[in-house]
Amino acid sequence: MGKVLSVTEAVDVLLQGQIVGLPTETVYGLGADATNESAVAQVFIAKNRPRFDPLIVHVPTLAAVREIAELSEAAEQLFLAFSPGPLTVVLPKKDTIPDLVTSGHPTVAVRIPAHPLMLSVLQSSGLYIAAPSANPFGFASPTTAQHVLDQLGNLISGVVDGGPCSIGIESTIVDMSSDAPKVLRLGGMALEQLERVLGPISTQLSSSNPNAPGMLTSHYNPGAPVELFNDREALLAALQLEDSDAIGILYWGETIAHASSFNLSEQRSDLEAACNLFKGLRLIGRAPVTRIYVHLLPEYGLGRAVNDRLQRAANK
Ligand code: TXA
Ligand code: MG
């Protein structure tokens, strides 16, 4: 049964080829030694994750990025500007990383996470750590150690408790493996910030993109059907027409007096809303409701990444 582990205990578990829950600033990861194929296989099994969906490899430094990937000048600029932080860069891979990690792709997704405990685990183990988000495939990502224990506790030896994640949604993924950079996943690093370094950048987010096989249109299942509203008034009007106790609402801005509801950010902050998103989806999903109404955020900053996840949660 999984329990809370110290950094030293987690390092021992990883060096023995077992898997462990680890905190990052975005969401909790389920970590394995990226060079140990049997450890990596345990990650796919514990998450019930299809083998065609490649894993992100976490490293502590730019020097370590060079050990596992071909680093172009432009990619180096990105790392220098934004790492450690909520950014993952897809680069041509080197042979240090087994094909199982990248699902046979010639590229590897690399990230330097900003969480101090994750950095200690990376530094004291000397490992490259393959880690997807520590949730069963298709469900909300964990933003506390308790979420990891609740969802995967009986399948892992434990989790390092680094407190609630400060960003709360997964990293932004940028494909820098060709001359034209592309955003494959909206996440904790706002597009506007990336564009300050890279210039205008295209996005390719759909599930049909063979380069981001994990970006399925249906994901983050909260347990009840989700309906999206662009407009607060429309959501409130729809609520009037229903047996409103059977409806959960996930919203932002001024408080709405309603039994099963969760305010992502009363202050209307995109950062706060991102940080609360998965907690909100979990709480509303556990409430006795048959449907969930969601008020989407304005499309700027992390609002885009939050809306992207809400749209996936609404797809069946
Ligand atoms: O914030 C994060 O990125 C968290 C923390 C733990 O670091 N990790 C995370 O991993 O969100 P995961 O496995 O839930 O999402 C990884 C995404 C998947 O959509 C996968 O398809 C994509 O990264 N990916 C991984 N390797 C790739 C590659 N070589 N090319 C394109 N996409 C890749
Ligand atoms: Mg995930």
Image: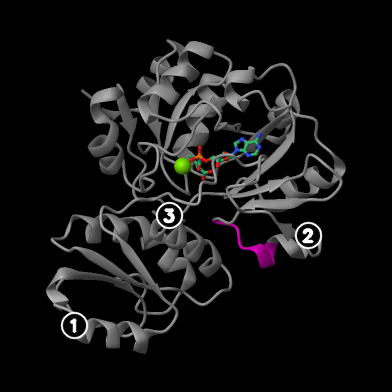
Label 3–label 2 contact, CB within 8 A:
no
Q: Name the residue under label 2.
A: 197
User: Can you say which quadrant of the picture contains the N terminus?
Assistant: top left
Label 1–label 3 contact, CB within 8 A:
no
Q: Along the line of sight, which residue is nearer the eye, 293 or 111? A: 293
Q: Is residue 191 magenta?
A: yes
Q: Of circles 2 and 1, which is in front?
A: 1
Q: Along the line of sight, which residue is nearer the eye, 178 or 276? A: 178
Between marks 2 and 1, how big is the CA–CA gap?
43 Å
Q: Say what amino acid the circle numbered 3 marks.
A: Gly
Looking at the picture, does residue 214 appear above or below residue 13?
below
> What residue appears at the point 78 percent right and 50 percent down from the top-left corner?
181
> What residue appears at the point 36 percent right and 45 percent down from the top-left corner?
139
For marks 1 and 3 on the same chain, the one whose residue lies earlier in the sequence:
3
Q: Give the range drawn in magenta.
A: 188-193
Which of the labelled discs sits on residue 257, or is there none? 1
Quadrant where ligand 1 appears: top right
Q: Is residue 95 left or right of residue 199?
A: left
For marks 2 and 1 on the same chain, the one whose residue lies earlier in the sequence:
2
Between marks 1 and 3, how big is the CA–CA gap?
25 Å
Q: Name the residue under label 3.
A: 168
Where does residue 180 sit, x and y in percent of width and height? 83, 50
Which SS class for mark 1?
loop
Q: In which quarter of the image is residue 66?
A: top right
Q: Does the magenta stretch include residue 48?
A: no
For marks 3 and 2 on the same chain, the one whose residue lies earlier in the sequence:
3
